[in-house]
Image (cartoon, helix red, strand yellow):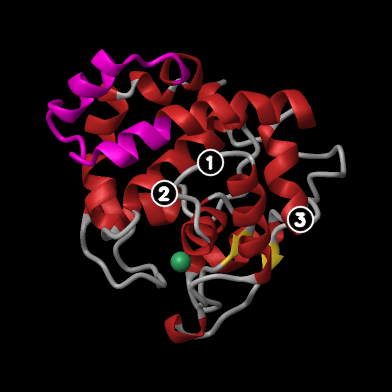
Amino acid sequence: MNATLKRCWNTEKPLCIKYHDEEWGVPLHDDKKLFEFLILDCFQAGLSWWIILEKRSALREAFDNFNPEKIAKYSPNDVNRLMNAPGVIKNKAKILSAVTNAQQFFKIQKEFGSFNAFIWQFVKGKTIDNGFKSLSDIPAESEESRAMSRELKKRGFKFVGPTICYSFMQAAGLVNDHLVDCFRYEQIRKSGVNWLNPVIQPRKSMNEN
Ligand SMILES: [Zn+2]
């Protein structure tokens, strides 16, 4: 972690800096990671992202490593357990939404072949390079996030309003919303690959291999 680099987030919190430098905005094509990001964004609704980042490891532990197979099968007992688990946001509607969203996730995989194919259709397979100069240029939602929200809601997903979908699109690199003077902006812009084009480096190959 290099503290002298120019970043678009004004933060000194190491967890925030690490997330900004390594994850936020990197085009993500792994179904399970996309699911994790969506669940985290659903939990964020109405809260600051910082709270979610701080609670992320507790959430991961409580939610079986964000494994959609396991979450889809959660019983009312599991929901009660989660309501009392340390570090979990005690919001029953959000916890139940994780279960519903996991169940719908598998329906989308079946219908589209992958969750990745479903999610990336909204930007035609390629990161939208916004090239914003100032934080005030960044919108809360976009035409694409409204379309994603509509389709997710139609399929029974919860906590997927256009603003949550836009946050998700930023985090998963469907849009490059690093400001142009941030050191990550060019790095991500140059790595831009069209997912519909077979030449692609999924993020999981960096982390898992
Ligand atoms: Zn940045």
Tag 2, which secondary structure? helix
Of badges 3 and 2, the one in the foreground is 2
Expressed as whole percent of the image width and height from the top left, the position of residue 72 reads 47, 19
Q: Which mark is residue 126?
A: 3
Residue at the (63%, 39%) spot, across then down: 155
Q: Is residue 1 visible?
A: no
On screen, residue 121 versus residue 99, left or right, reads right
Q: Dot 2 surroundings within 10 Å: few (below 14), some, or many (20 or more)?
A: many
User: Magenta segment, which residues?
Assistant: 72-98
Q: Is residue 76 visible?
A: yes
Tag 3, which secondary structure? loop
The disc, 3 or 1, on the residue closer to the chain's N-terminal end is 3
Of badges 3 and 1, the one in the foreground is 1
Q: Which residue is mark 2?
A: 41
Compared to residue 205, the image places residue 165 above or below, namely below
Report the amino acid beneath label 2.
Asp
- Inter-mark Cα distance, 3 to 1: 24 Å
Instruction: State yes or no: discs 3 and 2 in contact (Cβ < 8 Å).
Output: no
